[in-house]
Image (cartoon, rainbow, N blue to C red):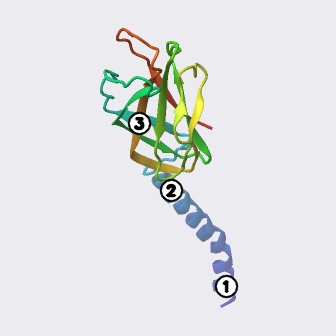
Amino acid sequence: MYRSISTFVKTIPIILFVIVIASVGLLAQNRGNSATQTVMLEVKPIAKISVAGNPTPLIIDDTFPGSGPASVSDENTKYSLVTNVDNMKIAASINDRMPAGTKLMIKLTSSKAASVGIVDVSSALAPVDVVRGIQRGSDANQSISYTFAANADVENLPSQSRMITLTLTN
């Protein structure tokens, strides 16, 4: 019996050696069946605004003597926005000042923020706020209203255009 225990004790290192070799072999086989990669993740600030439609020509063709400024409005344009940044605003600017005695005004509605109301952009070469307090999310199909006004002393103004830029910013 002593011999069999002695033989068993001598075989323990051999058994452990065989188990280790078998395990290494299995691990080596598994390495060929899988691969790893590092994936970089990032979310950048998103602030997008778009417009749809165009205002009809704003033509003043009738006024009454002594009635003061004449005006015409259009509400055919819509805007939509999406942002993942809190406390954004929309600012409007014009590419060229309006002629003397005339005004161009804009009003944007918003279902998720505070409209400033009617804003005179006649000389807004630098952006002026038209909507404030926009939070994360989207605001789709909101109205843009343009109003063109001319004093009674403006006689004849040839047809011209102005480019209005709406900027979603913080």
C-alpha gap between disc 3 and disc 2: 75 Å
Residue 89 image-quadrant placement: top right
Q: Which residue is mark 1?
A: 5
Along the line of sight, the residue nearer the viewer: 27 or 93: 93
Q: Nearer the viewer, mark 3 or mark 2?
A: 3
Q: Nearer the viewer, mark 1 or mark 3?
A: 3
Along the polypeptide, which appears first: circle 1 or circle 3? 1
Q: Residue at x 43, y 17 (%)?
A: 162
Along the polypeptide, which appears first: circle 3 or circle 2? 2
Residue type indicated by callout 1: Ile
Q: Can you give x and y, in whole percent of width and height, for residue 131 in the image?
A: 55, 41
Along the line of sight, the residue nearer the viewer: 28 or 9: 28
Along the polypeptide, which appears first: circle 2 or circle 1? 1
Q: Which residue is mark 3?
A: 145
User: What is the secondary structure assignment of the residue under circle 2?
Assistant: helix
User: What is the secondary structure assignment of the residue under circle 1?
Assistant: helix
Q: Can you give x and y, in whole percent of width and height, for residue 104 in the image?
A: 47, 25
Q: Nearer the viewer, mark 2 or mark 1?
A: 2
Quadrant location, the C terminus: top right
Q: Which residue is mark 2?
A: 25
Task: Tell me, yes or no, whether the two marked residues, 3 and 2, touch with CB atoms within 8 Å.
Answer: no
C-alpha gap between disc 2 and disc 1: 30 Å
Q: Is residue 9 left or right of residue 138?
A: right
Numbered mark located on residue 151 in the image:
none
Residue type indicated by callout 2: Gly
C-alpha gap between disc 1 and disc 3: 99 Å
Residue type indicated by callout 3: Ser
Quadrant location, the N terminus: bottom right
